[in-house]
Image (cartoon, helix red, strand yellow):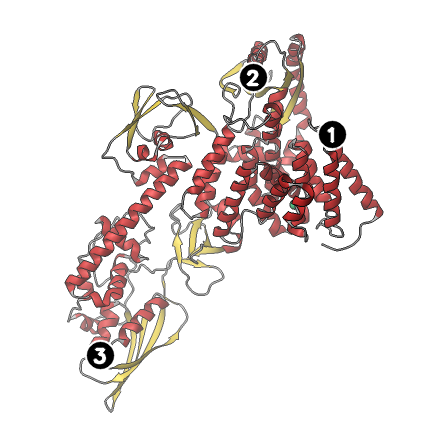
Amino acid sequence: MNNTTTTDQEELQIEQEFRALLADYATTRRHQREEIIIRAYHFAKQAHAGVRRRSGEPYIMHPIAVARIVAREIGLGSTSICAALLHDVVEDTDTTVEDIQALFGEKIAHIVDGLTKISGGIFGQQASQQAENFRKLIFTMSSDVRVVLVKIADRLHNMRTLEFQPQEKQLKIAGETQYIYAPLAYRLGLFPIKQELENLSFKYEHPEQYAEICRRLQENSNARLEAFERFAAPIRQKLTDMGYEFELKARIKTPYSVFKKMQDKNVSFEDVYDLIAARIVFTPNTDRSEREQCWGIYSAITEIYRPHPERIRDWISTPKSNGYEALHVTVMAQDGQWIEVQIRTVRMHEIAEKGLAAHWKYKMGIDDSTGLDQWIHQIRELLKDPNPNAIDLLDNFKLNLFASEIFVFTPQGEMMTLPLGATVLDFAYQLHSKLGEQCIGAKVNHTLQPIDYKLQSGDQIEVIRSENQRPQRDWLNQVVTSKAKSRLGNYFRREERDLTKLGEQLFDEELQRLGKSEIRDMAIYRLSTYYGFRHPNHMFMQIGKGVVSLKPLESLLVPSKKRWWQLFSNPLHKQPQQQQQQMLPLGDEVNDTQPISATQRPNQNLKHIILSDFNRDVEYQLAPCCHPIPGDEVFAYRDEQGIYIVHKATCKNAERIKSNYGKRLCTAEWRMHHTLTFAETIEMQGIDSKGLLVRIFEIISNHFNCNLHEVKITARNGLFAGTFELEVYDTEEIQLICNELGKIEEINSVKRLSSSANKSF
Ligand code: MN
């Protein structure tokens, strides 16, 4: 931003924009507070004086543009308009919230304060910060929803001017918009804004597909509109005959919704038949109900065109939870194409366009029975969950935003809203988490159904429970509501904690029985290496479950006398066993409980992946969500613990990860056909004594099961010196070996000599 004074021409332009804002305001319902808007404008202009945006415009043009969106596109009043004009003042200038309060009063100051708090964006550097920002957003939203409405207007203007941002910022902002703001706008009933946000995000995220779809939409647009006119003409005639004042317009799909349809239905552009839809907005007569008149128009249309029996959506009898009301029907046009017709009254239309603000206008205050309040309440419930995982939180939230809904009933006839795809189990959890945990099925419309039965609108459900029932892991795949998911997650976390504790206790008891408690760390390392567990807690949990046996512990800790001699009878350069033990994500069952033969090297550290930017092996895990196998196209990202999680490129989580973790991504490739290990040399010095060598071999070859490549030993004047070249998988292992060797009394020093380049076998 350059600090330069504005030119006369710019002054004129600013003045014009502001006048346009006042004109927008004048068309709103209550418009007698022009004075405070003028004051806010002068204040903001003064505060931002001399500052320019990246586009080169004077900064004040941005707050004015946001205020115009707030007034014209969302239909909010003077308080929100002032807050929009002042929204960047506290953030970017020396002005404080107290100043705003003194000059413009409590309400405006509160909104500006909320906006300043969430200005960091949802996606910070760290997930913890994301969660924090997100909490703030939701809490400010539930204290005054205008905070979020102004925020959405701010985001819309930033998206409209996104071309001036550097590319990496474009991608981040577009990703964030797609992820949170578009669904949020939808949830608040701002349908045109939601569409524009999605479409702009699409434009910056997939510029080539965007351009291609725009081109193809343009190509036949004239023919398409002519066909539409042929379709619309008889309807227009009919509505005129019925005496209605109305508007009938073509609705062309946005490039993004065409793209989405192509993706969702896996079809080509030519196969997207509903590029165009019709919308009727009419002024109803006062003598009959709006609903009745909408259905009247429906039957008039179906006298001309044949209706599709399964595509009638009555959002009038049961409005969507964002307040949307309309009657949608699909009929067959002259050319055999199905065309959707949306029938709305002027009032319904305004609600569909301006969402919540229109609700206020018609209801003068938020009606407690609207789905929106219920939804905010649900989100707050979700936030009370102590689960600290920010990504889960965002996903659960998204789940709640996106879901289209079904309406079901309790046996008492109480209506509940559930997301599409909700099951009996979801319903049970919705009523009470105890009921969910003990659910064994339900009577759906008096017929017995299993817990994973998918509910449909209108179903009446009576949950059946049993004291003996316990939640099962696969239940997580049988629920869709965030409430059920988070309750199940809590349950399993609790259960895992208990089992891990139990496993650890059993392990310690066994160790005590063997009289090996003093080498506990070593014992943990050996047994987890033996079974291929990356983390001791994973092992303890499986022990607690009784899946993993403690039996091998004895032979792993009590050395066998003969073992080291085998080294000399075997060739030194032994092929490492290619036996593969897959890493076990927390909570997965151990399928193979067969003890691994002691002469094989259970190579849990086998690295199958090379990550770019690293010339050494780094810690990674194969993502449990998509289970990549060798040959899959993969990528990796670094999680908060610094571990690289390898996902398939086609993983459904990939898009989300890419938008959230841009900076933490790295490419990954499979390391095919060979396994890499390091050759490491250890140098030891000490006092020569009987049996020393035996003990050294014992540790290297027997305890750690390492292959030895070369051994050089000299013993002179009672002193011993030796170098041992071994084959290890990682530095952690060499360190453990050194530590163990150091424990031999006669050895004075142990050190790693070299870490030679990767050697393949
Ligand atoms: Mn702004």
The quarter in which the N terminus is drawn is: bottom right
Q: Which numbered tag is attached to residue 332?
A: 2
Q: Nearer the viewer, residue 176 or 620?
A: 176
Residue 608 lies, with reference to residue 717, above or below; the image says: above
Label 3: how many Cα within 10 Å (few below 14, some 14–19, many 20+) = some
Q: Residue at x 21, y 53 (%)?
A: 594
Q: Given the image, on which type of amino acid does mark 2 rest?
A: Met
Residue 632: where, in percent of width, then height?
A: 42, 49
Query: For the C terminus, which image quadrant?
Result: bottom left
Q: Which residue is mark 1?
A: 26
Q: Residue at x 34, y 35 (%)?
A: 433
Query: Which mark is nearer the camera, 3 or 2?
Result: 3
Label 3, on which residue?
693
Q: Residues within 10 Å of mark 2 (few under 14, many from 20)?
A: some
586 on left or right of 76: left
Residue 145 location (% of width, % of height): 57, 36
- The residue type indicated by label 3 comes to Leu
Q: Nearer the viewer, mark 1 or mark 2?
A: 1
Question: Which is more N-terminal, label 2 or label 3?
Answer: 2
Q: Earlier in the sequence, mark 1 or mark 2?
A: 1
Towards the viewer: 630 or 134: 134
Residue 250 shows in the view? yes
In space, the residues marked 1 and 3 are separated at their CA atoms by 95 Å
Q: Is residue 250 left or right of residue 498?
A: right
Image position, residue 10 (x, y; %): 81, 45
Spatial separation of the CA atoms under disc 3 and disc 2: 90 Å
Q: Residue at x 34, y 77 (%)?
A: 751
The amino acid pointed to by label 1 is Ala
Label 1–label 3 contact, CB within 8 A:
no
Q: Position of residue 534 (x, y in %)?
A: 32, 57
Q: What element does badge 2 sit on?
A: strand
